[in-house]
Structure formats: C-alpha cells, structure tokens
Image (cartoon, helix red, strand yellow):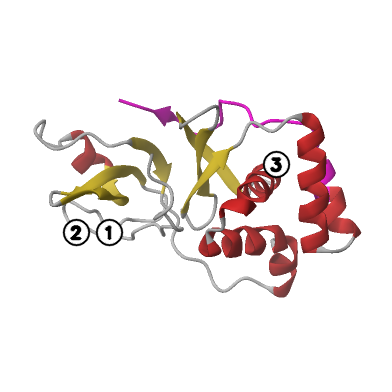
Amino acid sequence: MITQDWKIKARSHVCHESGRHFEDGENFYTALFEITDDEDEDDAHFERRDYSAEAWETRPEDQPSPFSFWRSVYEAPEPAATTEVVEKESAESLLRRLIEEDDATTENARFILAVMLERKKILVETDVKDAEGESCLRFYEHAKSGEVFIIRDPQLRLDEVEAVQAEVVAQLGGESAAKDSDSGSGQQPDDTNDEERMNE
C-alpha cells in the first residue's frame, strides 16, 4: 500500500481532461491513481487528478481505474486566513508538519489530529481502504481548500487513544487543545460521512 510518498495534494483549479477552469460552486470529481514505474515496480505513488463532472462521466473505458474517487463542490480560493482562524486551526498546522516530516512514530498522533479536525468540520472523510495488518487508510478532504490528506488508522485501543491524546495536547499546548481533544476521546471515526463516497 502506498502512503510513504504521499504528502498533502492541493486541489486543482482546472479540469485534468479539458483544461477548463472550474467555476465556484461547480460539482467536480477527485480521483487518486496508483502510478507505477515500468522499470521499477517498487517506485509507486499516488497521483491526484481533478475532473469536471462532464469529463468524468465521459472518460474512455480503456483508461485506468482510480484507487479512490469522490465528488466534491469547487470553492474559489478565499483571502488569507485571519489570526483568529489560524489559532483555531493549530491542530491542523501540527498535522501538516507531522505529515511533511513523515516519521512513522507519529502515525498515532496524526490519526488523533485528523479525528479532532473532522469533529471541527475542518476535514471531511471521503473514503476508507483496507491496509496491511489490522490498520486501514482514511482519506480526508479539507473542507475549504480541497486538499487531500491520507491518514493511517492504527485501530487504537481506548487506553492507547488517551495516551496519544495526552501527547497531542502536550505538543499543541494550552487548555483549549485539551478541550478539543476530549471531544473525540475514546471514539473512532464512523465509516460514513456527509460526502458522497464512491468506489469502483
């Protein structure tokens, strides 16, 4: 399963197939494809492609099937966030840093942060895929920017969840962080969400 090469992939503002710019409020499709190097099968990665609804529905049948895909609504870029918004999204900043650093020892913390951000409706879960062992991959889309986050769900036990939450709170600092973390204490994210989730 490919996750180590995946960072955070931003939403495109144009259709991959036609090159047409998306309009604000327009429905479009995000698809993730597994790309493998013909000369080195171990050199594989995910590639994100965004399609207009028309282009997606008329894709040739001989094109490769996506690993995962879902429908979203395009939102035109907004002005830079205010200081207040940045403070509320400190958990998001930490998650972005941990994903960029890609340290295997922070996978549990990344999962807890993703749950916190889902509770705050900053991230929206779009898909779930089985992974190696007992874990699974959860795909999230940023509610405002449309960026895709891939988070491994380690299937933590309740006592493990509490320990990781304490670690996350310590990194975020402050009582407000503890309050946000407690809102998801002992809970695993549902396998359903308000987005339309589709798989082939």
* Residues marked 2 and 1 touching at CB (< 8 Å): yes
The numbered mark, 1 or 3, whose residue comes first in the sequence reads 1
Q: Which mark is residue 148?
A: none
For marks 1 and 3, give the one nearer the viewer. 3
The numbered mark, 2 or 3, whose residue comes first in the sequence reads 2
| Residue 1 in sight from this viewpoint | yes
Crowd rating for badge 2 (residues with CA inside 10 Å; few <14, some 14–19, many 20+): few
Q: Is residue 193 left or right of residue 6?
A: right
Is residue 59 within the magenta segment? no
Q: What residue lies at 83% left-to-right and 50% top-to-bottom?
A: 166
Element type at marker 1?
A: loop
The residue singled out by tag 3 in the image is: 119
Q: Which mark is residue 19?
A: 2
| Residue 184 in sight from this viewpoint | no
* Residues marked 2 and 3 touching at CB (< 8 Å): no
Crowd rating for badge 3 (residues with CA inside 10 Å; few <14, some 14–19, many 20+): some
Q: Quadrant of the N terminus?
A: top left
The residue singled out by tag 1 in the image is: 14
What is the three-letter code of the residue carrying label 2? Answer: Gly
Element type at marker 3?
A: helix
* Residues marked 1 and 3 touching at CB (< 8 Å): no
Q: Position of residue 104 (x, y in %)?
A: 56, 52
The residue segment tinted magenta is 180-200
Q: Position of residue 141 (x, y in %)?
A: 50, 47
Q: Is residue 145 above or below residue 194?
A: below
Q: Position of residue 187 (x, y in %)?
A: 74, 31
CA distance for labels 2 and 3: 35 Å
Q: What residue lies at 36% left-to-right and 48% top-to-bottom?
A: 26
The numbered mark, 2 or 1, whose residue comes first in the sequence reads 1
